[in-house]
Image (cartoon, rainbow, N blue to C red):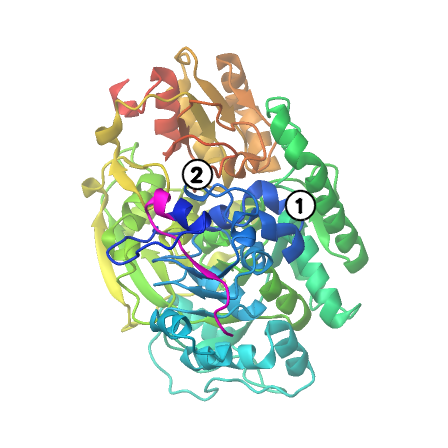
Amino acid sequence: MKLTGNVLHLLEDSLLVRAQLDGNTVETDGQSYHYGVNTDAMISGQACTLGYTPVILGPHFLRNFKEVVVDSAVQDGGFQVIVGGDAYGSGSSREVAVVAHVGAGIELVIADSFQRIFQENMVYGGMPFTTDRTVLDRLKAGEELDVTSLYAALPPFFRAVSEAGGLMRYGTQLLAGDIAPTYDVSPTPRAMNIAEKLIARRAWAGHGQPVGIASVKPGDQVLANAGFRGMHEYTTGMVVDLYRKEWGDAPMAAPEQVAAFEDHFVLIDHPTVPDAVKKARLAPAMNLTQEMVEACEQNGIRLHGPGRAFPPGVCHRVVVEDYALPGDVVVLTDSHSPTAGVLNAFAFGVGSTAMAFALRTGMIPVTVPKVVRVELTGRSNGVLSPKDVILHIIGDPYFREEQWRSTPTDTCIIEFGGDALEHWSVDELSVLTNMTVEGGLMTGIVEPCSPITTFLKERRGVDAEALFVHPDPGATYERVWKLNLDDIPLTVATPGDSRNRAPLNDHTDEAIHNVVIASCTGGSLADLRAAAEVFRGRTLADGVRVTITPSSTPVAEDAEKEGLLDLFRELGCVVSEPGCGSCIGNGPGIPFDGETTASTTNRNFARRMGAPGPVFLVSPAVAAASAVTGKLTDPRTL
């Protein structure tokens, strides 16, 4: 690679970004880079409905970033290298974010640190990247860079994949018997935490060898036998396209452990969705849906959705209700897959290439994470929710600044423990694991506790005790963090990033016009009950809109039986069918001009909900109280 094009620095100062797009050279010394350039900024939820090829996505790369980038601006500007700051690639597992870089002409990505899924997607798809800024100096000096030299900085598995030409080619060589494990398959036994034990039990030990090795440690990269694998409308078309190009009609591994979900697009045509959104998104979204339906029919994959063979719901909620079990490795092409970690499973999001690999080989690459153990003690006192707790945790400088990181390819998870877990149900605890990804983490996993035992017995008729994975005595942790619930205030995330934590009491003068109680994080039965408890006997403030979306069919049915949905309707709330559209601008609750939103969803990136306007992340009780008063409100003050 020789630098023949331009370099785009994604700086905090929007005027300097605009100047570069206008063809000017800017001075970057002393300038701050935008923190957490996210996948919604790289390629919006609307653009993702159009397809998944570089030609389609390239013109939409970074559209609306800092409110200064327009369609085709990066492509037309001849930018060859992009430079970012910390947490580059935050957010979704959407591999199309990498594809959009390619389509826009980007040949190299340089950043201070990368988020785990985005980094994996670059490795598996063949996009060169580095955290070494001196590489840019060398390019500017006229040096011709051998991009394969960047592989030397990668750990063995990433390096092997890169040298093979990407994960798909690596998979073909593995299936042919030409690949041996890149890691020690006879390690010395050691005391392990939950995640390490679970990964070691499922690690591939080589062709013809029993599954499992004696131990793993942070930084190891192994191939692990995957249990449940899942996809949805945004991703299934790309997954199957990659699969067919590499393996044609070859059979998938264990298709009975695969499901697809029609959940991201099912609410686009809801009556309250603005016509402009329907016009821009509905038709292409239905094309992607049809691709998914055909792929499921051809490969015998079960399909969840309205009118399908299996009931509709947000994929993460359905996985907890119907599929994941303690000790499982669970992967979906969605960043909020850590939800299933609430069941003492190792669950994480992957890109389309990794999923195609998993569908054919039955295995998924895993970088063994560093583990922070968070022990929760104290009492919730009926108001403090897991949403407050996780916003408090991921907003802490330790996670926001990724102080756990020592190398560019490190990963980290949270192991949740402590007697305070007993205060909440699986519904509520799933918010803790779901939102670990918002803190730049791979996943969260809950230690064995009675809420899991009760849930699996009542919901699935499963004996959890026989499946539980416990940490070994003497297991090693990156940090053990003891948190007393009494020390955690009701917490919000201020607009722009879920890590922007603030005490609710600092923002009680903030006017709220739009309230959304929905998503895999905020649409469970426990969430609807919490909102109803606040709403009962009260009315909505003048001019406040409220959208409520149950997260699954059983949740909707139970909420109907309990009279919760009737209560919401009588208040004047919009109550929709199960789905996850509100979170990503594909359903009711899209902000109108001039509105500020309080949402129980898990992500509040600029424009993610389908329109500009500030979004505060809050608990269901705070959302309901805010709808009653018209401003961010502590429900205890009502």
Is 49 situated left or right of 502 in this image? right
For the magenta stretch, what is the residue range?
1-16
> Measured from the top left, where is residue 601 in percent x and y?
45, 38
* SS of the residue under disc 1: loop
Please say whether residue 362 is one of the residues in the magenta stretch. Answer: no
**Residue sitting nearer the eye, 632 or 344:** 632
Residue for badge 2: 67
Q: Residues within 10 Å of mark 1 (few under 14, many from 20)?
A: some
Q: Is residue 528 above or below residue 72?
A: above
Q: Amino acid at mark 1?
A: Leu
The residue at 57%/25% (across/down) is 561
Q: Mark 2 Cα within 10 Å, few/some/many (few <14, many 20+)?
A: few
> Which residue has dot 1 on it?
50
Q: Nearer the viewer, residue 454 or 564?
A: 564
Q: How many marks?
A: 2
- Camera-side mark, 1 or 2: 2
Q: Quadrant of residue 549?
A: top right
Distance from disc 1 to disc 2, alpha carbons, whole Å, reads 21 Å
- Specify whether 244 is left or right of 53: right
Q: Amino acid at mark 2?
A: Glu
Which residue is at a point 49% across and 80% down the rendered structure image? 146
Residue 522 location, quadrant:
top left
Residue 28, horizontal then vertical, whole percent = 30, 57
